[in-house]
Image (spheres, rainbow, N blue to C red):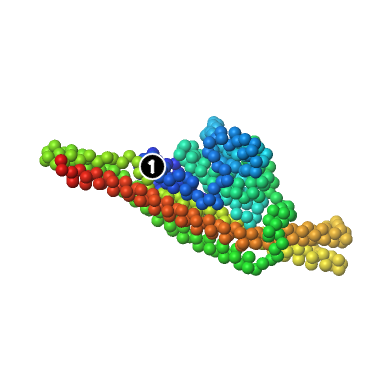
Amino acid sequence: MEEVKYEEEDSNIKSSANEILLDPLASTVPRPITNKLFSNEEILPEEEKSPIINKNSDSVLHLTESELDNKIGASVCSYSTKSNLIKKHVYYIIQGHDSSGTYEAHRSSKDFRTLRSVLVHNWPGCYIPPVPPKQNANNINPRFIEKMMKLYNLFISRIVSYNYLYESDEFQQFIKNPGVYHKLLLRKQPYQDISPKYTKIFKDYAKETYNEQNEKTVSEGRAFFKIGIEALEKFENLCKINVDYFENFESELTQLMTGVNSLSKFYQEQYGSKALSVSPREIYSNPFFVLLDWVRWEIIDLKAMIDAIDTKKEIDKRQMEIESKMETEKTRMLKIQAGKKMLSQIFSTNSRERNSQLLESSIGDMQKEILALSNISTISAAKLANLDIPKFKQLKAQKYEVILRTFAGSSIHEFENMISQVKEIEEVLNSKE
């Protein structure tokens, strides 16, 4: 997966598009002189919101017992920094509650990436929400950290929405174990443990047998998402261009209006023209940030869904490899039982009977693994084809419409502000005085 690089923002009015961090929650990206037009909640479809998200760092830990009953909530509410001799480290504070009570965890970006890596392995064929890619620099700029908080909060809220991920040992360790997460001995489950887990959790799909239509739907879904990523990457480039153009336009317009004020003073004093004083705009918003932030996150999210499909395909590949190896071992065992001496036996001290027993045991283990892999693959394919992919597409359509509405609203608001600024000139010139 390609890394998306983000850099620290300038405190300048002119900011390169390369300095924009992905922020799917914000309708406009706060710039040093930007006014935020829409709330975070408007940008997310209902299905993507955490059941309970409260950014007040105290409120989650002070709920009554009745409020805690049958509720699960978690959010990234704040952050802290710790310094060593070399650099500062940022830890994001997660607070939440469930049936066992309240909890608080301090996790680094590395911890978040570790969690997702383990979840991807232990839940093959399941969509695991994405986290921000690793950053090249140790960025402790408060604005940058706030944006990372929003992304990690989105990750946590999506995990909460999948009960099986929230209740998994991997996530429970993440939110409730005080140790350094990426240093914990996180066990990657063998396939023979994953199989019964899937049978128990995904009961609706556990009775499925191999279904060619499910396999076709999954393969077509992957191809569809790949095409989507290519289209989004092209759109991202267009967004970058428009972001830069608009930033430059706003900057030059501000300077132009300042120049109008200076010239008006001269023309009034020297030629007796009407006095003009255009109010300079100290804040503005770039509506193209809405699209740029959305498209960057959309690319990463589509790659996360492709990860789910690819881990399912890896299961299939592993099964084929084991089946091929098992056939080879069966052939060897038949030859040994027939009294034929294999090359490997020349240097072996084991008897023919012992070698036959070892091969039989190995074949038995492979048969168990094949059954586990087959079960995981069948359940994953059914779940992806009939639930995950259709729901993912539906949410994407809803989010796209919300984004376009947000972009339209932001654009109208911004251009109306520009028009009102120019109208000040017209009103003065049309006045009778």
Q: Quadrant of residue 424?
A: top left
In the rendered view, tell whether residue 352 sits above or below residue 184: below
In x, y percent, where is residue 58?
56, 33
Res. 319 in view: no
Identified by mark 1, the residue type is: Asn
* The C terminus sits in image quarter: top left
Does residue 138 appear to the left or right of 67 in the view shown?
Answer: left
Res. 35 in view: yes
What residue is rendered at 62% in x and 50% in y?
162
In x, y percent, where is residue 380?
65, 59
In the rendered view, tell whether residue 394 sits above or below residue 139: below
In x, y percent, where is residue 8?
44, 41
In x, y percent, where is residue 101?
65, 37
Q: Secondary structure at mark 1?
A: loop
What residue is rendered at 60% in x and 54% in y?
127
Residue denoted by label 1: 35
* The N terminus sits in image quarter: bottom right
